[in-house]
Image: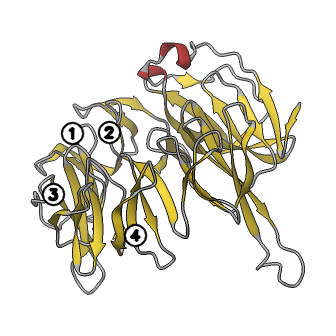
Amino acid sequence: MKICNLFIILILPISLSFHSFCKKQEIENLPLVAFLKDNKWHFLDHSGKELFKKKKLNVEIIDVLGYNEGFIRVNIKYNNKPYWAYIDLDGNVLVVSGVSYLFNFHNGRALAVKYFKGKGKDSVENEEYKFGFINYQGKVVIPLIYQDATEFSEGLAFVKNEQVRGYIDTTNRLVISLDTIAGNKFKEGLADVNTKNMIQGFIDTQGKLVIPLEYHLVNPFSEGLAFAIKGDTFGFLNKEGLFEFTVDGYIAKEFKEGLNFVGKFINQDSDLRWALINRNGEKITDYIYEDVKEFSEGFAVVKLNGKWFFIDGAGNKIFDKDFVFVDSFANGLAWISTKDGKCGYINKNGNLVIELPAADKYFDLRHNRRVY
């Protein structure tokens, strides 16, 4: 047992029948889905084979929460106590003690949060959270000294406390110093920042304010555009800070494959509907969809008249099948469930290639979200 600051790290070796992902880097061996059946979590790879099939864990997995950079994030019970933990692709379990919350790994670092309960009459006001980061070995490499922090993105993370406000690199070196504004994650070389009054703009990786603080809302950049609101103007900014085009919707997803969805309320009942647009802001469909997910691998997931299905880039329905729920394609596979009780993954021909048994929970480890 090794003690690192607040953390107790336990490495539990597992005998596995599959080769190391780090050496093979094959999509088939990547985690695909986790499901809870008969009070036990099971993990499948992209070929439908069960991961960790021969493992003999002396820990109980309570919940599956995410996957990134070779580590599955879980809640476990070990020695009848709850812990946060990660499972690597060789089946080793990294148990972390002394934290209130852990995030997925990004840029080799996982954001860790510790809750401190207040004391005395003003106990609620004295509550606080401390943020820091651990590495793949579970070692605290950036101490829990920050009052707020983002996950790492493009090698940088926003942090703040009474002494520091700005962006650090993965060695905890302050790279960008900010005065009173707060920052979010970098994407495509830019990060949105905001004042206390939530007026937003963008900085670059040198800390230069390249798009001024004059927007009431901005989304991160995707494919060179960011949805933004300035007064009564709704549209998409380019990286020069100019509206490349405006839209009549007032919420948007991110551009993927040159396509995006814009949403607005279409009646007094707060009925939010989505329209499909292209890279020039031209509508491909009207505001008809009740729910949507971003384009991926040539398809998008939409909901219309209470039914989920796939569309192509022209808004045409793909696969004339009646699904209860679907999710986006990734690595050639997409989650589906049907009225006759079948669920699992289809290929791009619409064929069910990995069928899963009935279970209490399903979690897609590519998109890091529940599926049904």
Report the residue at 46% width, 69% height from top.
194
At label 3, the amino acid type is Ile
Disc ID at residue 330: none
Binning the other alpha carbons within 10 Å of mark 1 as few (below 14), some (14 to 19) or many (20 upward) gives some
At label 2, the amino acid type is Phe
Residue marked by disc 1: 298
Binning the other alpha carbons within 10 Å of mark 3 as few (below 14), some (14 to 19) or many (20 upward) gives many
Q: Earlier in the sequence, mark 3 or mark 4?
A: 4
Report the residue at 30% width, 81% height from top.
270
Residue marked by disc 2: 329
Q: Secondary structure at mark 2?
A: loop
Residue marked by disc 3: 277
Q: Are marks 3 and 4 in contact (CB under 8 Å)?
A: no
At label 4, the amino acid type is Gln
Count of numbered tags: 4
Work out whether residue 59 can be spotted: yes
Q: Secondary structure at mark 4?
A: strand
**In this view, the mark in front (3 or 4):** 4
Distance from Cα at disc 3 to Cα at disc 4: 25 Å
Q: Are marks 1 and 2 in contact (CB under 8 Å)?
A: yes
**In this view, the mark in front (3 or 2):** 3
